[in-house]
Image: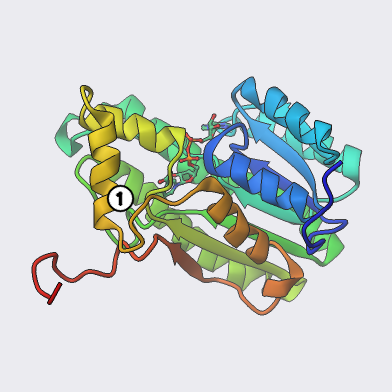
Amino acid sequence: MNKYVVGKLDGKVALVTGSARGNGLGTARCFARYGAKVIMLDKLDEVFAAAEEFKAQGYDVCPIRMDITDPRQIKDAVSKGIELYGRIDVLVNNAGVSILSKFLETPQELIDLHFNVNLFGVMNLCAAVLPHMVKQNYGRIVNVSSVTGPYVSDEGEIIYGITKAGVIGLTKGLALEFAKHNITVNAICPGYIHTPMVDGAAKQSNPRNPQAVLDGIARTVPLGRLGTPDEIGELIAFLGSDESSYITGIDITIDGGAALPETNVIGIR
Ligand SMILES: NC(=O)c1ccc[n+]([C@@H]2O[C@H](COP(=O)([O-])OP(=O)(O)OC[C@H]3O[C@@H](n4cnc5c(N)ncnc54)[C@H](O)[C@@H]3O)[C@@H](O)[C@H]2O)c1
């Protein structure tokens, strides 16, 4: 059985959306490693296999297959988590979608999908979990936004960026309204992290050579590579722990310095 690295989340109950793969899986792994019990939500069946792997390592996790675009399923999943563990200390709104599309050619269904998952799904999860956090007089919410939207953009990411910018507005508003209940609400803004989502965007950008796209991204990042889901998990674990008790309403960029260069031509190399 694995031993916790440091039990900074010992005894906490965390709900992590989109935890079948990518950043959510990395986050669930970090939380479990730090001692949390983790309710793993995802619409993919893979969430069960991921949870089995964690259980085999001695971690306490509960997988639930559900769709966060359905408020009924959100309510049921939150009730199931409360029934099982008695409380939810940390909510990580990580599930998201990103499909590239030119602004004037984006079909309504694709716009709806981005808003329903990335923004309304996050709002509805907050609405379902916050009453429990208020009752406990304790809570941590971490929303996974993006640098795309609040800070930068790439072609084809306008709708995605609008939803991610919206998540920052939601984060700040909730942080203010729920501070009196000892609940903190923060957001993180990742740059490019190597996940199935980014593999998908690389394939959409260059179907014949997606690896060239990934290599191209890495060249633009001062740290020389894409980030990993575990690096995302570490930041979220900090914001979900008591170590971050005086931080609320902010967003933290985690991008390997990608937003730093003012140009790529000026300088002595
Ligand atoms: N990977 C990056 O470079 C990057 C950068 C910035 C922000 N993000 C954000 O990080 C989060 C995770 O992204 P990722 O790269 O791991 O993506 P991913 O596609 O690899 O994983 C997303 C997970 O969310 C789940 N999900 C999607 N829609 C859902 C729904 N309706 N109900 C339940 N589960 C659903 C998927 O099944 C999947 O398991 C997203 O919010 C994304 O916008 C990612």
Which residue reaches farthest left?
265
Quadrant in the picture for the N terminus: top right
Task: Residue 198: name its quadrant.
Answer: top left
Q: Could you say whether the residue bearing mark 1 is in a helix, strand or loop? A: helix
Please state which of residues 145 and 179 is positioned toward the viewer in this rendering.
145
Any part of residue 109 in sight: yes
Q: Is residue 186 above or below residue 194?
A: below
Which residue reaches farthest top?
45
Task: Identify which amino acid the numbered label 1 is placed on.
Answer: Ala
Q: Residue at x 68, y 29 (%)?
A: 50
Left or right, residue 190 beside residue 264: right
Disc 1 residue crowd, few under 14, some 14–19, many 20+, Cα 10 Å: some
Left or right, residue 138 beside residue 120: right
Quadrant in the picture for the C terminus: bottom left
Whole-percent x, y for residue 230 in the image: 58, 50
Q: Residue at x 52, y 61 (%)?
A: 187
Any part of residue 127 in sight: no
Q: Residue at x 28, y 70 (%)?
A: 260
Q: Is residue 65 above or below residue 261?
A: above
Whole-percent x, y for residue 84 in the image: 89, 38
Whole-percent x, y for residue 144 in the image: 51, 52
Please state which of residues 217 and 137 is positioned toward the viewer in this rendering.
217
Circle 1 residue: 218
Which residue reaches farthest bottom?
246
Task: Residue 165: name its quadrant.
Answer: bottom left
